[in-house]
Image (cartoon, rainbow, N blue to C red):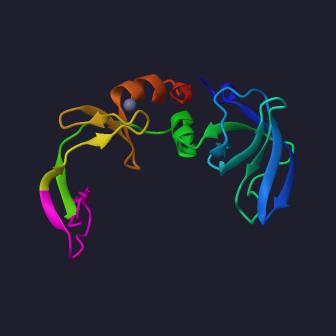
C-alpha cells in the first residue's frame, strides 16, 4: 500500500471560520474516511485538524485546522492523502523514509524510575534520566516496549528493531512495512 492508495482530499477553498483556517475540498473516495481528528499528509509537514461536515453523497468535507495561522504549506488547489487521527503522520514519514535506520536489538529489561501516585504505576526509563526527588529506582521494572505500529509487546529476549528516536518495531512489522516501505498497516 502506498500514499496514493489513501483517500485523497483535494482542496478547492480556504477560509478563516470562527478564527481558524478551514480547508474545503472533495475526496476521491470515502473508504475508511470518518469525521474528527485526522491528518492531511505532506512529507514531514502534515497538517492536523478535524474533518467536519462530511457529505457522503458529494464526498465534500471541511478540514478545520483549528489554527488561527494559515497552513505553513500551500494548500489551495493541492491534493493530500488523508490519514485517520488514530495514526501519527510521523508513522508515514518514518516508514517511507529510504534512509531510516532500524537497528536489530534483543530487548533487555532495564531499571525504571517510579513515582508514588495512588492507583497508578507511573514509570519511565532510568537510563540517562535524572531522578526527581519523589522517584525511586525499581530494578528491572522497565520490562517491555511496544511496537510503534501494531502495539504488540517486545519482551525481554525478544528481537526487535530500534531507531535513533527510541521507536521500536516488532520483527513482523519491520519485515512487512519498514523493509519494503509499505503502508499496509494503514489499511482498515
Ligand atoms: Zn508490530
Does residue 132 show up magenta in the picture? Answer: yes
Q: Quadrant of the C terminus?
A: top right
Visible residue check, residue 104: no
Q: What residue is drawn where x is 67% and y is 41%?
A: 35
Does residue 73 show up magenta in the picture? Answer: no
Tell me the chief SS of the magenta region.
Answer: loop
Ligand 1 - quadrant of the structure image: top left
Q: In the displayed structure, would residue 58 be above or below residue 138?
A: above
Between 165 and 140, the one lying in front of the other is: 140
Q: What residue is drawn where x is 17% and y is 45%?
A: 109
Magenta residues, start to end: 115-138
Q: Quadrant of the N terminus?
A: top right
State the image coordinates of residue 146 (x, y, percent, origin top left).
33, 40
Query: How many numbered discs, if any?
Result: 0
State the image coordinates of residue 50 (x, y, percent, origin top left).
67, 50
Between 70 and 104, the one lying in front of the other is: 70
Q: Is residue 176 left or right of residue 60?
A: left
Q: Residue furthest bottom?
A: 133
State the image coordinates of residue 24 (x, y, percent, origin top left).
83, 46
State the image coordinates of residue 185 (x, y, percent, origin top left).
50, 28
Q: What residue is drawn where x is 66% and y is 37%?
A: 34
Q: What residue is drawn where x is 67% and y is 33%?
A: 33
Between 162 and 101, the one lying in front of the other is: 162
Q: Residue furthest left?
A: 139
* Location of residue 170 (image quadrant): top left
Visible residue check, residue 32: yes
Q: Is residue 171 left or right of residue 13?
A: left
Q: In the displayed structure, would residue 24 be above or below residue 113?
A: above
Amino acid at each position: 500500500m502506498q500514499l496514493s492508495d489513501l483517500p485523497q482530499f483535494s482542496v478547492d477553498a480556504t477560509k478563516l471560520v470562527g478564527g481558524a483556517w478551514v480547508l474545503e475540498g472533495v475526496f476521491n473516495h470515502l473508504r475508511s474516511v470518518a469525521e474528527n481528528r485526522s491528518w492531511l499528509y505532506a512529507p514531514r509537514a502534515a497538517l492536523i485538524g478535524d474533518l467536519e461536515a462530511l457529505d457522503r453523497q458529494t464526498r465534500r468535507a471541511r478540514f478545520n485546522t483549528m489554527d488561527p495561522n494559515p497552513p505553513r504549506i500551500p494548500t489551495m488547489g493541492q491534493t493530500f492523502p488523508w490519514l485517520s487521527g488514530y495514526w501519527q503522520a510521523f508513522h508515514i514519514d518514518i516508514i517511507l523514509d529510504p534512509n531510516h535506520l532500524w537497528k536489530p536489538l534483543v530487548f533487555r529489561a532495564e531499571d525504571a524510575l517510579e513515582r508514588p501516585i495512588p492507583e497508578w504505576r507511573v514509570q519511565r526509563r532510568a537510563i540517562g534520566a535524572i531522578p526527581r526527588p519523589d522517584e525511586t529506582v525499581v530494578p528491572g521494572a522497565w520490562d517491555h516496549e511496544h511496537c510503534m505500529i501494531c502495539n504488540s509487546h517486545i519482551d525481554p529476549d525478544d528481537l526487535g528493531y530500534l531507531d535513533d528516536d527510541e521507536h521500536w518495531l516488532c520483527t513482523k512489522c519491520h519485515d512487512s512495512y519498514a523493509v519494503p516501505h509499505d503502508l499496509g498497516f494503514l489499511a482498515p
